[in-house]
Image: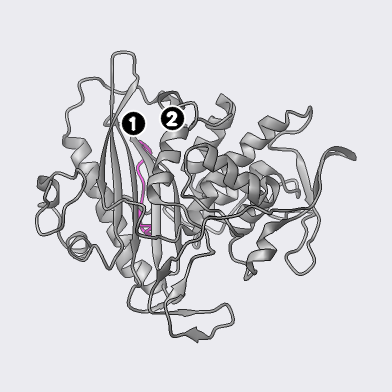
Amino acid sequence: MQTLHYRTTDYFPESWWRRKKGILEEVFRRAEPFRLQVIYTQIDRDEQQRPRFRDFRFQAGPDVYSYPASTVKLPAAILALEKLRDLDIPGLDMHTAMFINPLAGINTGVHRDVTASRGLACISHYIKKIFLISDNDAYNRLYEFIGQEAFNRRLWENGYTDVQIRHRLGLPLHEAANRHTNAMKFKRGNQVIYEQPAACSTLAFAPRHDLAGKAWRTHKGTVERAPMDFSIRNRLPLASLHEIMRSIFFPEAVTNQQRYRLTDGDYSFLYRCMSQYPTASEDPVYDHQQYHQAYCKFLLYGGSQQAVIPPEIRIFNKPGWAYGFLTDTAYIADFGNNIEFLLSATVHVNHDGILGDDQRAFEEIGKPFLQALGELIYTIELERPKPIIPDLSRFQP
């Protein structure tokens, strides 16, 4: 269908976009330089509460590269839990204390975690930190636990063949260094429950040529006056990210190939972590001025420090922001109005400046845009008739 003012979209009805104004209008009017992609899924239930989906997409194809930033932490959390299930070792679970050996020239080891109430690292604590404040080190430790090759092969098995998870986050490491993962052991008291040796991935990745920006700032602070080459960086297309969200919130409604080997307890833990606010966390505990309620809630609330999210609205999401790319993927439920929907979007807000100097563009363009987009879709959901009232009790705290 042809939308008002813009090139052909996949399915978005033109009437929706007549409502857009302000930052929404500006970004959609210049959708190509902003590398804008949006996926919205309407969810209806039948008499047995089985979900039925209708997807609406705007430019969400595989040809336009978007750096996924911290959104790769979502599959990391899922696959770490799945690996624990696959290992099936008595005494080994997400709460078992883990100790990680250092890798010379790559990264440090872990023998304690001062952010944890008991002072020890574990898979569950890293997953909490990933969703509460998008902690990079927490992701890196899950990456090391899963292993680069297993991480990618499992996602490829799920059908996400365009995905490439190639590196840690927040560490200026060469490609070869990110193939190496640390030795580690899991212990209960003095008893070693599981020991994992250091490894080196030999996985071959399909070649790519992904460029963005006109200049970029290196980790040493110098500026390179050329497009930034993302060809050996992580790749997680928005369509794949959206499908991963669908598969963990509606595992019964996706194919066996897309489903993860998780228990009901694993899903409940993920839901709790994905929707909790830093201000509500007691382990770990964060500074509420820096890590406020909406710190990681961009769709609908724009990450605003002043936002007050009503208790009847629960946002399960994972955002990512780096090098001018801002992405958020969310399942949003309103228990008061019986609303549920999936919404994912990515926008490149710093296409004219220096990649790496992005904070102002995130605050002035990216976050307000995602907030306005979430508000538009939420309004559409409020107005949309639902023949069957959804039972959302599975997602309530």
Q: Which residues are magenta?
A: 302-313
Residue 166: % across, % down: 58, 57
Q: Nearer the viewer, residue 92 or 316?
A: 92
- Looking at the image, do the residues carrying marks 1 and 2 touch, with CB atoms under 8 Å apart? yes
Residue 259: % across, % down: 50, 30
Residue sitting farthest toward the top: 47
Q: Nearer the viewer, residue 26 or 281?
A: 26
Amino acid marked by disc 1: Phe
Picture quadrant of residue 353: bottom left
| Kind of element beneath mark 2 | loop
- Measure how far apart labels 1 and 2 are at the Cα level: 8 Å
Question: How many numbered dots are placed on residues in this image?
Answer: 2
**Which residue is rendered at x = 48% and y = 67% of the image?**
230
Amino acid marked by disc 2: Gln
Quarter of the image with the N terminus in it: top left
Query: Few, some or many C-alpha atoms within 10 Å of disc 2 (few <14, some 14-19, many ≥20)?
Result: some
Task: Give the residue pinned by disc 2.
Answer: 396
Q: Is residue 215 magenta?
A: no
Up the image or down, 352 lies above or below 112; here it is below
Q: Nearer the viewer, residue 206 or 232?
A: 206
| Kind of element beneath mark 1 | loop
**Which residue is rendered at x = 9% and y = 46% of the image?**
15
Q: Is residue 372 visible?
A: yes
Numbered tag placed on residue 335 in the rendering: 1
Q: Is residue 131 left or right of residue 210?
A: right
